[in-house]
Amino acid sequence: MKTKFFDYLSEYLEYLSVERGLSSNTEQAYRGDIIAFINFLEKSLVFEFEKVTKPVINSYIRELRSLNYSPTSTVRKTASLRGWFKWLSANELIEHDPTVSLEGLRLSRYLPKVLSANEINTLFSQNLNNLQKAILELLYGAGLRVSEVSGLNISNINLAQGYIRCFGKGSKERLVPIGDLAKRAVEAYLKERNLVSTGNTAKTQALFLGVNGRITRQEIYKLVKESGKLINKNITPHTLRHSFATHMLENGADLRVVQELLGHSSVATTQLYTHISKKRLKEVYFALNE
């Protein structure tokens, strides 16, 4: 039986891209979450929106839990459904939004792993190639997101003045300063990169090149994981970004400054993102509100 699920999904994704201006990575995340739900509906012999009820969605959430999805992933997938059904209802494509009465899922506060200063020093003292070192320097030394590193073009780097122009969530642009170690790492990589003279990769404006042109997020994850093995640590790009923020705050950096460097729209996000002491948070809070 042909359903309208996928037709309406295509329209919704176009709305996210064109009207809300979400990045392609965010759009793909929504797509994956909603397609997984549609597959669940069809497996459950639910082929019409009128049959999508609160009990059906709760059954889906129970299935996610039975498949050992983390609370964070479950909440994200549920939020994707809320957004889709809210749009469907607003555009009068369905009569009732079955997610309106869903109880909000509670999340325990998750604090990502953070490397100590000694572990960072050990990591960078290893025998890293130029690509590894440059990427690790931007993830830790500048606190960039993995998608921001992947999306960098050569024109985004100003080594003379020591800053990077990057585009974060919602395509928000910000300037991030880089230190001497990061500059030297990028310079060394660029000299090596410029030796590439064959294939389409030589013509791309992408700063970091992977197997098929611009380096992908997956390739960066793999690179970071391999680097972590050198210090017997299972790390991700987020580990380095979180370490950057934590070390900045532990050394007395202003919370607002770290917020700007990370590209957070709210200072509250920065507070949750870092596990600094309550005493330090109080000091910064009162300093901001004097």
Image: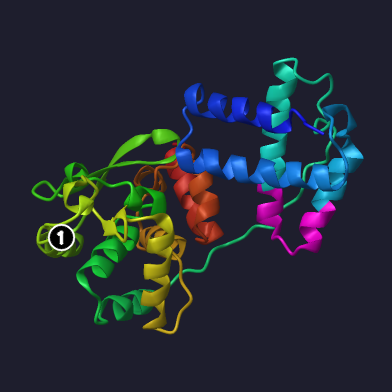
Looking at the rendering, the stretch of residues picked out in magenta corresponds to: 62-76
Residue 111: percent from left, percent from top: 57, 62
Q: How does the figure colour the protein chain or chains?
A: rainbow
Q: Is residue 117 above or below residue 216?
A: below
Q: Amino acid at mark 1?
A: Arg
Q: Is residue 200 above or below residue 190?
A: above
Q: Can residue 250 be seen from the camera position used here?
A: no
Q: Secondary structure at mark 1?
A: helix
Q: Quadrant of residue 29?
A: top right
Residue drawn at 66 percent across, 47 percent down? 76
The answer to whether 272 appears left or right of 216 in the picture is right
Magenta region, main secondary structure: helix
Q: Residue furthest front?
A: 1
Quadrant housing the N terminus: top right
Q: Can residue 119 be seen from the camera position used here?
A: yes
**Closer-to-camera residue (289/25):** 25
Q: Which residue is mark 1?
A: 193
**Closer-to-camera residue (65/94):** 94
Instruction: Give neighbour class at mark 1: few <14, some 14-19, many 20+ (Cα, 10 Å).
Output: some
Residue drawn at 74 percent across, 41 percent down? 38
Residue drawn at 51 percent across, 21 percent down? 19
